[in-house]
Image (cartoon, grey):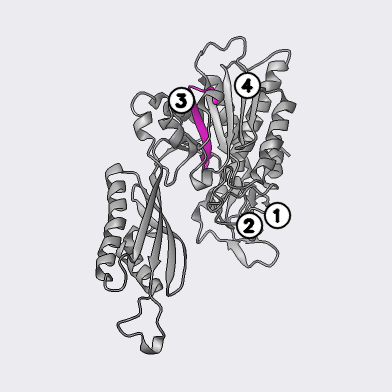
Amino acid sequence: MEKVIERFLRYISIDTQSSEMSGLSPSTEKQKMLGKMLEEELKEIGAEGIDYDEEHNYLYAVIPATDGGKNEKVLGFIAHMDTSPEASGENVKPQFIYDYDGGIVKLGEDGKYTLDPANFPELKKYIGKTLITTDGTTLLGADDKAGIAEIMAMAEELLEDQRSEVPKYIHGKIAIAFTPDEEIGEGTKFFDVKRFGADYAYTVDGGEIGELEYENFNAAAAAVTVKGLNVHPGEAKDKMLNAVRVAEEFDGMLGQSERPEYTEGYEGFFHLMRFSGNIEEAHMDYIIRDHDKVKFEEKKEKMQRNADELNAKYAKFLDKTITVELRDQYYNMKSCIEPDNMFLVENARKAMERLGIKPIISPVRGGTDGANLSFMGVPCPNLSAGGHNFHGRFEYVPAESIIKIKELLVEIACSF
């Protein structure tokens, strides 16, 4: 088995699910298990400048330049250690589907869940390949442990080459960083750009092999609280205000067409992530997304405007029925890449073409640590990690994609 695949399997065995509810940094203590493992592995492969911020679980390291490396600028590679709060990352049991035949893949022995090309047509691209899937009970963790494995395998290969009698690679200084809590929008909360030491970087956090992205959503989170009045239903006429019903009304005002399941490309959305409540009080957690900054601001204004309208409608019951708390999470990195730093995109595209990888340059319908880092002074496009269907039980990654992306990182590092 290829070393990069062995690494991937080792990393997904550790539960690193982050949490939006803890208020801590990192949001879950268990993420540090992977941080400490990676620190030890970096020592074992001979990386330099290893710097582990154990308090917040950020890990930095350096691959020194070779004798012939002339570029004084430092290139970095970044991946995140946490997995999504949307599905369990505990006790992951990967399945290997060898020489995939293009048919339905049963997840787990009971076959309750399947990967069906009728629902996931991109599976047809991987006929003859080896698929690594879940068993249907957890997510897989390719987001972003495939990225971590690929960066670590790249580092190991370059460091081993430096110790060989006849080195074949020439490159400048390369920086590495692994972060926590990317999935909850806090991956760069305590990121130290100076400790990282890179002038430019790539996150390795995309999906299908070939993805190359320098545009992402502008992102905000919204916490909506709805107050109600509970009265016995037998005498509720003109007295009861059902918080659940008002919450439904608020959600309906946002528009069905602006939900993620009805949007694509550059279209933004409101996404209701959680709903809980009763007659007296209901809570809704949303994320708001749009590539266009003006439309992004309009979406936030629409949410507040709808709340104001319902507060006026139900003023006879309560002074304030609905409260909306908005928090920006990250912004579109495009303004930090175009035009001065487009060479990063071009370098990656050419490296892909040299390796026979078809570049897929498209906007990220999501975000990466690279978006925030770009605004922190480190322009940082996003490279594919190789997986599909992130954040749930239908996640999978072709083994060949992980292997090829490791080769891509080596190629990019040596052509910078």
* Residue 5 location, quadrant: top right
Q: Are marks 2 and 1 in contact (CB under 8 Å)?
A: yes
Is residue 116 shown above or below 243? above
Is 8 left, or right, of 284 in this rendering?
A: right
Along the polypeptide, which appears first: circle 4 or circle 2? 4
> Residue at horizontal 56%, vertical 30%?
408
The tag on residue 91 is 1
> Marks 1 and 3: which is nearer the front?
1
Q: CA distance from mark 1 to mark 3?
A: 39 Å
Secondary structure beneath disc 3?
helix
Residue 412: % across, % down? 53, 25
Label whose residue precedes the other's in the sequence (1 or 3): 1
| Nearer to the camera, 274 or 327 | 327
* Badge 3 amino acid: Asn
Counting residues from the start of the chain, the first of labels 1 and 4 encountered is 4
Q: Is residue 277 above or below residue 295?
A: below
Q: Earlier in the sequence, mark 3 or mark 4?
A: 4
Number of the label disc, if any, that sits on residue 174: none
Residue type, mark 4 in image: Ile
Magenta region: 196-209
Amino acid tagged 1: Asn
Tell me the crowding category of disc 2: few under 14, some 14 to 19, or many 20 or more residues within 10 angstroms, Cα based: many
List the residue tagged with mark 3.
347
Residue on which disc 4 sits: 63
Q: Residue 138 shows which numbered tag?
A: 2
In the image, residue 167 above or below residue 98: above
Q: Is residue 313 magenta?
A: no
Q: Earlier in the sequence, mark 2 or mark 3?
A: 2
- The quarter of the displayed image where residue 60 is located: top right
